[in-house]
């Protein structure tokens, strides 16, 4: 198969959702389609610690969770699928955001009984800022939830994205009859946990389906559908690819219902790997020469060896185990012989891979997040990964003041690696650590102790809303505890607002001070 064909069949995506919306349940169904697992409940077991334990870092063992997102890859029909996990709950970290820089599309799961929830909103913002195409799966239609029209309206208003329902549900909960499949021009009947029935539009009016047609929720859905056909947004592939319109599917991951139709449609519509920006202009995935970038580093997976795995997104060409590549930043040539592919929990050696694939490479402590690897003569760097605004802030000091040197070295390296973000207090030069999730602090503390032999003390400054400032407008006297002034690693000034109220108050009082939200500008 040609490189072009290999690239065209790749689908690399992440599933984003708020905890409990059904991400595990849906992922499990997709893994079943891919024959990666044989029965449901396998992935779920991992959560409760029933899954085979690996020799991952101690903290993972203690908590029974995977600290950083994992990757699942499998062939499905004519496609090669890469699913990147985006952990939530306490595992939420900057890695969760960074994972989204390595995908070509995203599936957003929304719980029909709850609508848009906090974590979905956060992850959505990253997709929006990067223009990633988003496909929506509204889950739990087998339970009495919110009205479908109301849910669409909420998506449009809260997330500011056009919606295009690919199917339309008739009833919900106990009255759930099934979906009108607009794309496949059929009615898909819900039979509880039994197999779904597919009725083509042409035969819907036959005598055999008289009973279905007589149900009020069927009629109501049909009317709504007509309304949508006439007055709803028109489907635009261009808008979907630009992340401005989201195709919406209704279903139930648990039943399962509508999952296969969703997946088949999604996989055929979702983009294959697209060109990626670099200092030498856009790099086409079909370019012969291999290139990629590192978006995540997982440290100490095996404490005995202290080795690390760097997650690499291949952006062009073909990867072959043992090939030599250049690390652009350090102008170093490295032979990639220890590689891993991630299939749920098992790790297989990967011999070859193509643009779009994600592989794990052994990291003898030389890679940094955002590093570009290239084979061949070309020289370029992929665009820097964005800095994500942290939400939690803690002041950090060494327990033992004699360990200052180790302490500084540890912080410097962990910052470079992207494990945490470092800020300096404006007035007192205090070290302030910003994180997206609480877990990052645990990992930080653990690694400072184990790798740099330094115990650290953390003092919470609480949740904060960071806004970057333009230096020439700076008058330090207008900032106080509610708008704490700090500098980021590059020396830019940042105000950490205590809450929305403090932010709005400041904005009203000093309208001329430009407050920059990184989510809006990246
Ligand atoms: P998450 O990974 O997004 O956190 O969600 P997960 O799949 O674990 O699902 C959260 C809960 O919602 C689970 O119930 C799951 O069974 C249920 N669920 C998922 N999809 C559907 C659906 O389509 N319909 C209904 N009715 N429920 C669904 P739980 O009671 O928390 O877990 P369990 O004890 O059933 O495993």
Image: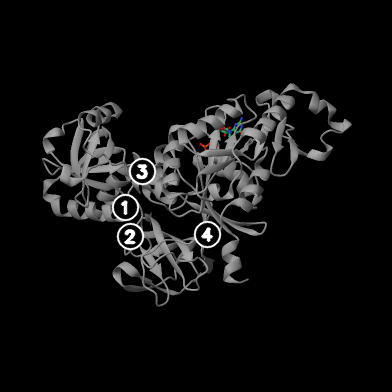
Give the CA separation, mark 1 to mark 3: 18 Å
Q: Earlier in the sequence, mark 1 or mark 2?
A: 2
The residue sitting at 55% across, 50% down in the picture is 238
Give the CA separation, mark 2 to mark 3: 23 Å
The residue sitting at 18% across, 52% down in the picture is 408
Q: Earlier in the sequence, mark 2 or mark 3?
A: 2
Q: Between 419 and 385, which is closer to the camera in this rendering? A: 385
Check disc 2 and report its element: helix, strand or loop: loop
333 in relation to 181, above or below: below
Q: Which residue is mark 1?
A: 418
Disc 1 + disc 2, Cβ < 8 Å: yes
Q: Which residue is mark 3?
A: 519
Q: Position of residue 261 (x, y in %)?
A: 68, 44
Give the CA separation, mark 4 to mark 1: 25 Å
Quarter of the image for residue 428 reads top left
Disc 4 + disc 3, Cβ < 8 Å: no
Q: Which residue is mark 2?
A: 368
Check disc 1 and report its element: helix, strand or loop: loop
Q: Is residue 396 left or right of residue 23?
A: left
Name the outermost residue toward the front: 230
Q: Is residue 201 left or right of residue 13?
A: right
Quadrant of the displayed image that contains ligand 1:
top right
Disc 1 + disc 3, Cβ < 8 Å: no
Disc 1 versus disc 3: nearer the observer:
3
Specify whether residue 120 is in view: yes
Q: Which residue is mark 4?
A: 273
Give the CA separation, mark 4 to mark 3: 24 Å
């Amino acid at each position: 198969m040609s490189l072009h064909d290999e690239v065209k069949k790749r689908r690399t995506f992440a599933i984003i959702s708020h905890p409990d919306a059904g991400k595990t349940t849906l992922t499990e169904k997709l893994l079943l389609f891919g024959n990666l697992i044989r029965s449901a409940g396998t992935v779920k077991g991992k959560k409760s610690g029933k899954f085979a334990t690996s020799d991952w870092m101690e903290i993972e063992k203690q908590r029974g969770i995977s600290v950083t997102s994992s990757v699942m890859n499998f062939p499905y029909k004519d496609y090669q699928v890469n699913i990147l996990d985006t952990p939530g709950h306490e595992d939420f970290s900057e890695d969760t955001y960074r994972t989204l820089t390595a995908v070509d599309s995203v599936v957003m799961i929304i719980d029909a009984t709850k609508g848009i929830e906090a974590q979905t909103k956060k992850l959505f913002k990253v997709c929006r800022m990067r223009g990633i195409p988003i496909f929506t799966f509204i889950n739990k239609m087998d339970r009495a939830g919110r009205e479908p029209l109301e849910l669409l309206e909420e998506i449009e208003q809260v997330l500011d994205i056009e919606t295009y329902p690919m199917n339309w549900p008739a009833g919900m909960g106990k009255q759930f009859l099934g979906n009108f499949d607009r794309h496949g021009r059929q009615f898909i009947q819900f039979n509880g946990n039994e197999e779904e029935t597919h009725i083509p539009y042409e035969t819907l009016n036959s005598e055999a389906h008289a009973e279905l047609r007589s149900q009020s929720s069927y009629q109501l859905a049909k009317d709504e559908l007509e309304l949508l056909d006439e007055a709803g947004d028109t489907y635009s592939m261009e808008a979907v690819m630009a992340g401005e319109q989201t195709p919406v599917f209704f279903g139930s991951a648990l039943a399962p219902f509508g999952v296969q139709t969703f997946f088949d449609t999604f996989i055929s519509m979702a983009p294959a790997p697209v060109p990626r920006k670099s200092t030498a202009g856009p790099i086409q995935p079909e370019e012969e020469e291999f290139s990629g970038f590192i978006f995540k580093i997982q440290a100490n997976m095996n404490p005995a060896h202290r080795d690390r795995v760097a997650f690499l997104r291949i952006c062009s060409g073909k990867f072959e185990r043992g090939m030599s590549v250049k690390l652009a930043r350090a102008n170093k040539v490295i032979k990639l012989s220890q590689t891993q592919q991630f299939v749920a929990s098992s790790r297989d050696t990967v011999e070859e891979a193509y643009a779009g694939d994600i592989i794990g490479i052994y990291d003898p402590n030389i890679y940094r997040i955002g590093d570009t690897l290239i084979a061949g003569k070309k020289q370029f760097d992929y665009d820097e990964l964005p800095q994500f605004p942290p939400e939690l802030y803690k002041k950090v000091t060494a327990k033992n003041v004699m360990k200052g040197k180790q302490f500084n070295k540890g912080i410097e390296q962990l910052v470079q690696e992207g494990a945490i973000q470092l800020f300096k207090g404006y007035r007192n030069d205090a070290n302030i650590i910003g994180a997206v999730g609480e877990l990052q602090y645990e990992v930080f503390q653990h690694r400072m102790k184990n790798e740099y032999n330094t115990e650290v003390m953390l003092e919470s400054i609480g949740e904060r809303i960071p806004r970057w400032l333009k230096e020439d407008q700076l008058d330090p006297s207008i900032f106080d505890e509610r708008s704490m002034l700090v500098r980021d690693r590059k020396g830019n000034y940042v105000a950490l607002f205590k809450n929305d109220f403090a932010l709005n108050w400041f904005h009203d009082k000093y309208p001329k001070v430009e407050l920059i939200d990184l989510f809006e500008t990246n």
